[in-house]
Image: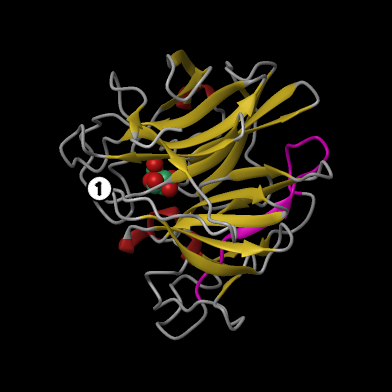
Amino acid sequence: MMNEPRYLFPADYMADPSAHVFNDKIYIYPSHDWESGKPENDHGDHFDMKDYHVFSMDSVDGEVTDHGTVLRVEDIPWAGRQLWDSDVAHKDGKYYLYFSLKDKTDIFRLGVAVSEQPYGPFIPLDDPIKGSYSIDPCVFCDSDGAYYIYFGGIWGGQLQYYRNNKLGEGSILPLFNEDALAPKVARLSNDMTSFAEDPRDAIIVDERGNPLKQGDTARRFFEASWLHKYQDKYYFSYSTGDTHLICYAIGDNPYGPFVYQGVILTPVVGWTTHHSIVEFKGSWYLFYHDCVPSEGKTWLRSMKVVALEYDDNGQIKTIQGQ
Ligand code: FUB
């Protein structure tokens, strides 16, 4: 049991850690923060990341191996700028890296890069996933072998510009009393490189079954989707963005609806909060980031891990971010 949080890689700034267990090791796929000098704004221009590293560990308190640079923005044919959050899935001996990146017209798309190894290097496909938009992909493999991709993020993540998977039909956030924008979910095709269906809303509802409202900023979805399964239930977790919480909601199937449950992580130092949840050797862990080592510079984040616990009813015990 690991009760105290651990900084995983003090030598450099890494954020948005997506953790998975492959071949009995924990692999971590983070964003790679750096001091680009870009001014801070609500579009997130100050998150100007240009490559990815992969990390692995044999145990959560053991040595952390940096596998080096595994994908660079200049190697991606359709790239504009800003490599944001990513995730990796394994199928039939191949590892698929899903990433957020602005195209040459400054619109976020989801890209795919492929490797024969969990530690890369990853070779990007020529084009982004057809019909993809916004940010923060998370890929979940269900017990029946079907893979689902979750994505979306408002403000700098551009989700507010879309309605019914089309750009320009909404263009603004819903009003205070209107239903909140939902994260998106789609089953992946057998070859893992495209949507097998049009993305659907993964709706988060309150205890009465009503969709959360846009004004409910302490509970509604902002970005950073993650999906894990615990005791046959589907736990969808996410960031509330401007209220700086990691929350979760539970559903009976991968599409939801997901019923809001509570807070997993209270605010950390820094504006963004982002996480992943993974089981390793019978224990559960929360991977996340904060800006303590950079003394609050919100674009220079450091990745951490801490134990995550459930109570007897399957409720996640809240972890203090500070
Ligand atoms: O790292 C850039 C962005 O910050 C991510 O895509 C968001 O989830 C937030 O953590």
Magenta highlight range: 180-195
Point out residue 121 in the picture as x, y percentages from the top left corner.
Answer: 57, 16
Q: Is residue 143 magenta?
A: no
Q: Compared to 301, does 178 lie above or below? A: below
The residue that label 1 is drawn on is 322
Point out residue 59 in the picture as x, y percentages from the top left corner.
Answer: 50, 21
Residue beneath the point at 50% across and 34% down: 79
Q: Is residue 291 left or right of residue 315?
A: left
Q: Nearer the viewer, residue 137 or 205?
A: 205
Q: Is residue 311 left or right of residue 303?
A: right
Residue 97 visible, this angle: yes
Residue beneath the point at 59% across and 44% down: 138
Q: Is residue 192 magenta?
A: yes
Residue beneath the point at 21% across and 37% down: 292
Q: Point out the residue furthest to the front here.
A: 312
Point out residue 55 in the picture as x, y percentages from the top left corner.
Answer: 48, 20
- Identity of the amino acid at label 1? Gln
Q: Is residue 262 left or right of residue 122?
A: left
Quadrant position of residue 17 = top left
Residue 15 visible, this angle: no
**Dominant secondary-structure state across the stretch colored magenta:** loop
Q: Nearer the viewer, residue 242 or 56?
A: 56
